[in-house]
Amino acid sequence: MSGWRGISLCFCFSVGCGPLQAVAVTCIDGWKSGNGIGGTEVLATGQTLTKEACAEKVQNGNVPNCSSANGATQKAFGGCYCEIGMDDLVDNTDGTMTCLFSGSWKLDPGAPMVVIPAIVGCVLLLCCCLCSYVYCSSEKGYLLRQRLMCQNVGDEEEEIVVEDDILLVTPDYWKNQDMKKNFDGRHPPTPEMKKLINKMLVQTFKDVQTRDRQDGRIPQSLKMMECIQVENRDQWLKYLKGKARIQRKRPGGLTPVGGPANLSSLASQKGEVMMRSSLIVDGYDISSKNTKKKAKKNPFRGQADKSVADAKNGCRTSSISKRVPKLLDDSVNEYFLFHGTTPEGAFGILESGFKLSFVGSHRGTMFGRGCYFAECSSKSDEYAKSGSGQLQNVYGMLVCRVACGELFRVLKSDLKSIEQAIACGFYDGVFGDREASVGTYREYVVFTEDVIYPEFIVLYQREYPTE
């Protein structure tokens, strides 16, 4: 459960229990007793009770509605009564009464006029709190949470920019923080971010090759030569809208790679749910505007190995540092992932973004016609090529933010199942787990262009063992 949902539930519990507390206070009001229902001792020996505070209950030094049955005096008021001994109350001369013996308050089943309204109030408050919990999970609730998370303490004059119900904010380490301005810049990253990207490059490298490494030579490591941070308002806005689309589509949340399974997600539901089929045209999912919701069941629910919760570990780039997950949005399964190319190709992608029309032009499409990313630098290096001219023997790799959404896990190429999974609407992308089946790599495939933001260009060299 996310922190915001946990907070909303705690709020529901604390406020919802208010009427129950009110019952206890009502039952003992005027007798200066603590909390107590159902036999809890609330009248201590020597406790003084004011007549003024109990004008409706105490008349002329006597307690109304008393009876001496079974040797006990009952002082009834407010739907409750106190059982004490016959001679336990002494009428003082100063207008007060003193309890000489301990007693207990109990709920009077014959006088429920206070309890019933309190219980009704409790139910109403709990219903209101439940609505607040649902709101926190909704699209507008997501917007509210993002606003609260992005507000800078002490900077109350900063204007919050919203477009199409989407909060327009940039990462806190960017130079450009004002989304009202148009910007398109290439900058050196902060020392912290450069160190983090280099750590991803080095620590996710594996001495494993596949048939995608065409030259057959695997380097022993990759050495970063240059890292460039990309800040482009238009592409970032497009990405924010892609994230918001997934958020609307997945109100119950998602299952992250490596689990735990999210039993509230649409893909985890046993019965039918109202679901739109995905309709992808020119790299965009236009189903939200052009298709109607229908009652559907997830055809792959419960099938072995289809959930990313069954993956052995979480995304590798997120596990190299505790800092990385804090930079990402887990509500859309956002990860930093690698994409191998040439130096020239990397800068070309920055100009126009990823284009699904180019899918399969350089490699195959084992997991469908989508954009492919890897969590290991050594896998993306298999797709990289040397630059030309002054960039000879220099390779290019992009580190992208990818909002993966609900991922469909496969252990081998199964295009029929993949097409069905994406079309049915329960999944947004594919998690090709060849590491689990043959010990190689895990790839992430998405099928729309608006869920990818190429944030860093890494220019590097391959280092081979000395012969």
Image: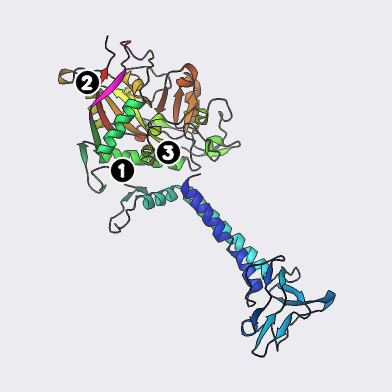
Q: Amino acid at mark 2?
A: Val
Distance, label 1 to label 2, CA atoms, is 29 Å
Q: Nearer the viewer, residue 250 or 107?
A: 107
User: Disc 1 or 3, which lies upstream in sequence?
Assistant: 1
Q: Residue at x 18, y 20 (%)?
A: 391
Which residue in the protein does label 1 denote? 171
User: Disc 2 or 3, which lies upstream in sequence?
Assistant: 3
Q: Answer above or below: position of 111 versus 278.
A: below
In the rendered image, residue 123, in percent from the top left (x then y), is placed at 61, 60
Q: Amino acid at mark 3?
A: Val
In the rendered image, residue 362, in percent from the top left (x then y), is placed at 32, 17
Q: Secondary structure at mark 3?
A: helix
The residue mark sitting in front, 2 or 3, is 2
In the rendered image, residue 344, in percent from the top left (x then y), is placed at 21, 24
Q: Is residue 302 magenta?
A: no
> Residue reaching furthest right?
70
Residue 359 seen in render: no
Q: Which residues are magenta?
A: 211-226
User: In the figure, residue 130 lies in which quadrant?
Assistant: bottom right
User: In the figure, residue 113 lies in which quadrant?
Assistant: bottom right
Q: Answer above or below: position of 376 versus 144.
A: above
Magenta stretch: dominant secondary structure: loop
Residue 114 seen in render: yes
Q: Is residue 215 magenta?
A: yes
Which residue in the protein does label 3 denote? 332
Q: Residue at x 32, y 32 (%)?
A: 400
Characterize the local packing of mark 3: few (<14), some (14-19) or many (20 or more) Cα atoms within 10 angstroms. Answer: many
Q: Secondary structure at mark 2?
A: loop
Left or right of 395 on screen, residue 67: right
Give the number of the disc on residue 394: 2
Q: Answer above or below: position of 114 versus 275.
A: below
In the rendered image, residue 284, in percent from the top left (x then y), is placed at 37, 33
